[in-house]
Amino acid sequence: MLTPVTEGVLVHESAFCRSNTVVVQGEAGVLLVDAGVHEDELTCLVGDLADLGRTAVAGFSTHPHWDHLLWHAGLGAAPRYGTARCAATVRDRLSGGIDARRFGIPEEVSLDLLGLVTGLPADAARIPWDGPEVRIVEHRAHAPGHAALVVRERGVLVAGDMLSDVLVPMLDLNGTADPIGDYLTALRLLEDVLGDVDVVVPGHGSVCGADEARARIDRDRAYAHALRDGLDPADPRVGPSAEPGWEWVADVHAGQLQRLSR
């Protein structure tokens, strides 16, 4: 079910890792950001938009991970965008198909329309659509071509897979020269736009206000510094203080520590 978070912006939270789909309403239709995961949830989204008398006129994937690249035929054939680097990464990774079991993709997830993303020009600053201006804040944290979106007219930051209250920062460790530096740079970019927003929607976890987002940035920065220095992050998302059902985040943390130590 879609839940309004501010005027003209609605969010649906998936059962899968509390993934957030964002709907931005425009004059002619809606922009869908990270459309959803489970087939029944996407079908529900189609119905919710029909109830609103709206159709999707554009889509956007914040980054090239499978759970942000899905679509449903009932949403129509609207153009689906990503940054140029995101789209190029998707093409490369899907060129030989995708092993659903290897990536831990649930059986009930349809991959029929996976990754049909059009890359915007490398210097694109905004999503081309007939609606409120949506500014693109591209960075290198978490995944190639990752983008946050600022809907200034609505006071909303769509953070992609950052600023989560349940996930620690997950670095891109696949051949990047300075993954921790990339993450810290991205945090500064997001911090710089918080003065323009009142609502922040992370890719996974709870929607929050700007003050809470600043606290999350501080927490994420402290986590990245601890990783850099090989220290215990003392992070509430890791260990016994983690939210029930999210204990596996400690394994993510341990894996990052191990890879960075090599």
Image (cartoon, grey):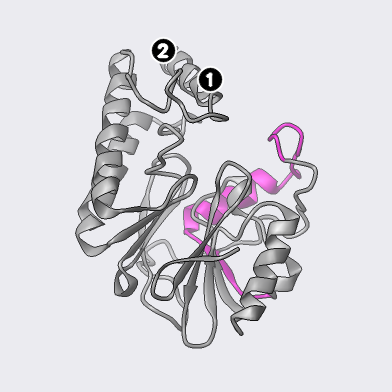
152 to the left or right of 87: left
Residue type at mark 2 is Ser
Mark 1 is surrounded, within 10 Å at the Cα level, by few (under 14), some (14 to 19) or many (20 or more) other residues, namely: few
**Which disc, if any, is residue 170?**
none
Above or below, 138 relative to 249: below
Single out the mark in the foreground, 1 or 2. Answer: 1
Residue 261 point in image, percent of width and height: 41, 12
Q: What residue type is labelled 1?
A: Asp
Q: Nearer the viewer, residue 148 or 118?
A: 148
Q: Is residue 71 left or right of residue 222?
A: right
Indicate the position of residue 227 as horizontal and vertical percent values: 34, 20
In the image, the segment drawn in magenta is: 77-105
Work out whether 79 lies above or below 221. Answer: below
Q: Residue 251 carries which label?
A: 1
**CA separation in Å, label 1 and label 2:** 15 Å
For marks 1 and 2 on the same chain, the one whose residue lies earlier in the sequence: 1
Instruction: Read off the residue under disc 2.
Output: 261
Q: Is residue 43 visible?
A: yes
Quarter of the rendering occupied by the C terminus: top left
Mark 2: which secondary structure? helix
- Dot 2: few (<14), some (14–19), or many (≥20) neighbours within 10 Å? few
Question: Could you tell me residue 62's position as x and y percent?
Answer: 49, 55
State the image coordinates of residue 93 (x, y, percent, origin top left).
64, 44
Q: Which residue is drawn at 32% across and 28% down?
A: 224
Looking at the picture, tell me which residue is in the foreground, 166 or 110.
166
